[in-house]
Image (tube, rainbow, N blue to C red):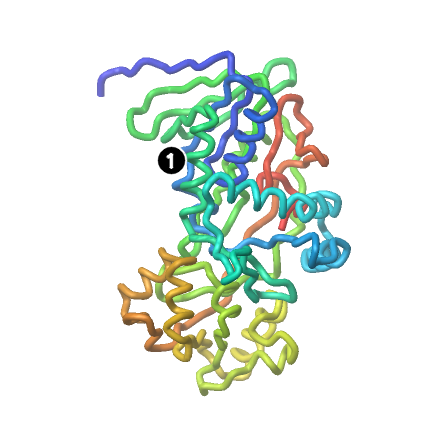
Amino acid sequence: MPETQDVVIGDIDVLVIGGGAAGVFAALRAKQSGADKVIQVDKARVGKSGASCFAAGVMHVMFPDNDSLEDRVRRAVRASGYLAQQELIEDHFRQSWPITLEMESHGVAFIKAPGGEIQRQAGRGSHPVIMFGGPELMDAMSKAALKMGVIQANRVMVTDLLTHEGQVIGAVGFHTRTGQFYVFKARSTVLATGSTRFKGSVMEGDRTGDGFTAAFRAGATLMGAEAHEGLTNAMVVRYPIGPGMNMYVGEGARFINAKGERFMERYNPTLKERSGLRFIAYGFSMEVKRGNAPIYCDMTHFTAESVRKLKAVLPLAMRMYERVGIVVGDRFVKPIEWALIPDKGRCGLAVNRSFATSLPGLYAGQRSGGGRSGV
């Protein structure tokens, strides 16, 4: 191959690494706060890769006129085994409604009730969620960032951070197609590259931990490896389809065993399939132990209206169901085998309430920060 010339980009006010929701918001906030040159880097395309693009179509938002902040924080902290940065979870809930309205102003289309207000849908757990059109959320937010003047450097894989006298001053990487070497020189750097995850067969952005690993090599302090996010999760097996459980159980999906029995009421009579993951993990495990495997998610009783709602909120998953013959027209024609899967690890960078790391000049957004700092 012919030699390619290195690309050096200097005088950056804020460098954002990662193309998901946390990264886009970091870039937007930098511009709104007066930063002139803001560059967002992604190893694929901003808004088209990572976990945010493959989100389950729902968000946990605290409605200030309907919900109790104290109750929401208490439940979220309890769900993480109390190994959490509680003040950051509180900040999340306080800001969730204003941020929702801001996202809507940028063109994010939330599902609306007949009266025109954002609709709340039953999901997993005691509190309802709000719904949006799957990958369309990131399309809208990516376009909003471009409109505000954020520069997007796509298909550049950042490998390491640049430091000088203990301070982060940028990053280096390479173009995944041309092989060109990139050098970014920045006054502030934000990592929004996600956490870690066992690579299974589910459709979700792989989380390699490469971002905070680069920060660790540069000398940043890590935390949260003992704080696994949830006991486990449950998703479709045999097909690489998922996630979406919140929407499924909110619409009335039933978990049944090999005998056709609906069993979650044995383990949580109140919420049943809408139980938290620890109850679902316990229920699945006990049914297997009793010889009642495999486990299925049964949505064959869904109305055509419910299926059409799923197609709007979870378009990628629903297209895959159609391709393998599980969904025909506006009906689920057979139950889907489900199983427990390892959930996300939570090791990440130690951050304070402003998401500053132990390295001057370096910040970590959402899942790149350790210690269960979000919802």
Name, please, the residue furthest toward the right. 70
Q: Is disc 1 placed on a helix, strand or loop?
A: loop
**Vertical comparison of 50 with 286: above or below:** above
Residue type at mark 1 is Arg
Q: Quadrant location of residue 279?
A: bottom right
The structure residue drawn at horizontal position 50% and vertical position 74%, both measured from the top left corner, is: 252
Name, please, the residue furthest toward the left. 1
Find residue 194 and report its horizontal and vertical position in percent: 53, 41
**Vertical comparison of 310 with 109: above or below:** below
Find residue 275 and report its horizontal and vertical position in percent: 61, 70
Q: Quadrant location of residue 4?
A: top left
Find residue 321 and report its horizontal and vertical position in percent: 33, 65
Q: Residue beneath label 1, please?
A: 45
Viewer-proximal residue among 220 and 138: 138
Find residue 36 and report its horizontal and vertical position in percent: 53, 17
**Vertical comparison of 94 with 230: above or below:** above
The structure residue drawn at horizontal position 53% and vertical position 60%, both measured from the top left corner, is: 115
The structure residue drawn at horizontal position 28% and vertical position 70%, both measured from the top left corner, is: 329
Residue 158 seen in this snapshot:
no
Viewer-proximal residue among 256 and 35: 35
Quick one: quadrant of the N terminus?
top left
Left or right of 349 on screen, residue 171: left
